[in-house]
Image (spheres, rainbow, N blue to C red):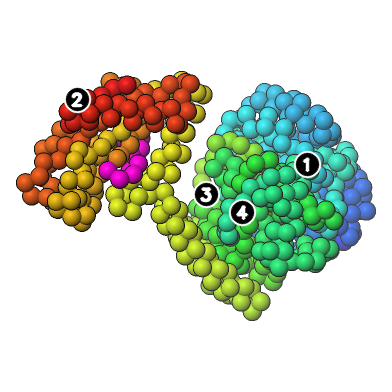
Amino acid sequence: MKHIPYLCNDINEFFHVVDGFADMLPSFGEYSCVLATVFVDIKLKEEAARIIAKMQDTLPEVKLIGGTVSANITAGVISYYGISVTFSVFNNSSVDVLPIYWNDEDSKQIGSDFLKRLSRMKHLVAVGMYTSGFTLNVVPFFNELSKLPSDIIFFGGIVDDGTVKGQGFVFTNDDIIKYGHVMVVFKGSSLIANVGYTSGWRPLGKTMRVTGLSNSNTISEIDGVPVRQIYEKYLGISKWDDIFLREAVVFPFAVQRSSTPLARLPRTVADDGSATYGADFVLGEKVRLCYGDPEFIIYEARRLQQDMVRFQPEGVFAISCWARQVLLHKDVNQELEACRKSAPSTGVYALGEYIRTIDGGIFLNNMCLSIIGFREGGISTNFYESIPMKPIRLERRNGIVSHLMHFVQAVSSELEDSNRRLKDMARIDFLTSLMNRGELEATLANALYDEHMNNTHTAVLMLDIDNFKQINDTFGHDVGDQVLRSVAEVIKQNIRTTDKAGRWGGDEFIIIFSRTNISGAKNIATRIREKIMNKSFACDGCHITVSIGITEVRKEDTVMSMFQRVDTAMYNSKRQNGKNSITVS
């Protein structure tokens, strides 16, 4: 495989490059397929028809994929002007370029049809997809394509018209598509591909929940308030025109899909306080604001590309979110350094990037950098174990931002640790380190729900220390507290990790045995009773025993009815059976 990128200043230089490549092509010897990838500066978008005509006339056998962009990546360098054209010459592999004309109502059917079409292809390795139109409902479409074998790479992005609000177009050898996609399908028994994704944005502040959606891309409420209030409260943003976009773009929301965090880029805020984003949300899902630390973003991008260097590609495709260059400004080329030193590369800055998670799910993402490398069999002659990198040196503006973001990260970590400790304090009984009564009640309610929904067995045990008042009166409350801690320790040592134990109050304890029947619970109860009876306690010469009641959760139970039944069983052990016994109800 040979991957040959060019950057042309204007259409005349593009014609010259195409003619030169046509003259050079015979020197490559036998080849199986040639792909031309063309990204056009939005100022030259009117030249798209002439680009297509030139390719048809001069290189009719070459497969063409193209689109409009506000910035391209040519040979690992970002360019804001001109026409980027890259010729990928394959020795034994093949490429199909497939247009997709779009209708939101048919999203699932289009996905199903293309899934069948792709599934019939032999030696399918990777699929790239370039889209015109950032409001397309691609979720049903991707749900179908996610059924492809998980080792098939999927990448691509949404082209633009040089603004956040507008859209560009994509094109092939035959047509310009202003609302739809173009798929580039890579096939070959000797073709090997590798992909990596990185964001670098990190979570900031508390977890919130989407409580209102106008459509899949537009949130009306978060935590019951208009989204605009979130930006006003946490970011101090109060202007809702292009200034909002410049200021809020580096603070996306993050959602979790298939255990993978995905960013959501803000685009507009409406008068009613709703906000539209560059990708979809689901009602009820959790979100967090994120922030971008320039140094960390560049570091993560370099780490990703070092992994790609070790793959030893012969050609690299890159798709990066335009918000990355908005944040990084002049430092943006530092995150592409490895692409300039390993294999020839071409790429695009997009309004949204397609990624595939480890479990095969395909999603639209924002704020992402995707690097896709190809080689045809064997090991590339461009061998690098690693690429020496220059130290990251940020321009003054980004250096200050990076220091501030480091401070924010440190403070946020401290706050999260404090909140975690406070949450534990609210859940845990301080004396015994078991669950407190409030947490036990919540766990009992969950056990009831599990029983109702899944018809599982759950047993509940109540334990009371016999003659505990006498221990306090005789030896003092400090010794009484030590007895409580010792009993709690015996309980913890004799239950499973799936069981839940807590202090109900005073000298009473409750254990919830998940997926356990009465017989299993009674065996554990017997062991606990005997361990306590034979244990030495802080009150020298005193003999500690416990009375235990056990019941099993029933479908008609409430927390109160279940508690009353197990409390009665424990009472019978104490009053009717002479203490130090177990009663089942």
Please give the residue where the numbered disc 4 appears in the rendered image.
288
The x, y position of residue 230, in whole percent, is: 69, 58
User: What is the distance, in whole Å, between disc 4 and disc 2 at their CAs?
Assistant: 56 Å
Q: Where does the magenta region start and end?
A: 496-507
Question: At x 79% / y 55%, what residue is drawn?
Answer: 273
Q: Point out the frontmost of discs 2 and 3.
A: 2
Please give the residue where the numbered disc 1 appears in the rendered image.
215
What type is the residue that disc 1 sits on? Answer: Asn
Q: Is residue 43 visible?
A: yes
Can you say whether 39 is above or below 403 in the image?
above
Residue 577's disc is 2
Can you say whether 217 is above or below 450 in the image?
below
- Circle 2 SS class: loop
Question: At x 10% / y 45%, what residue is drawn?
Answer: 542
Q: Point out the frontmost of discs 4 and 2.
A: 2
Q: Is residue 347 visible?
A: no
Around disc 2, counting alpha carbons within 10 Å, would you say few (fewer than 14), some (14 to 19), or many (20 or more)? some
Would residue 483 be found to the left or right of residue 389 on screen? left
Q: Earlier in the sequence, mark 3 or mark 1?
A: 1
Please give the residue where the numbered disc 3 appears in the rendered image.
311
Q: Earlier in the sequence, mark 2 or mark 3?
A: 3
Q: Earlier in the sequence, mark 4 or mark 2?
A: 4
Can you say whether 545 is above or below 164 in the image?
above
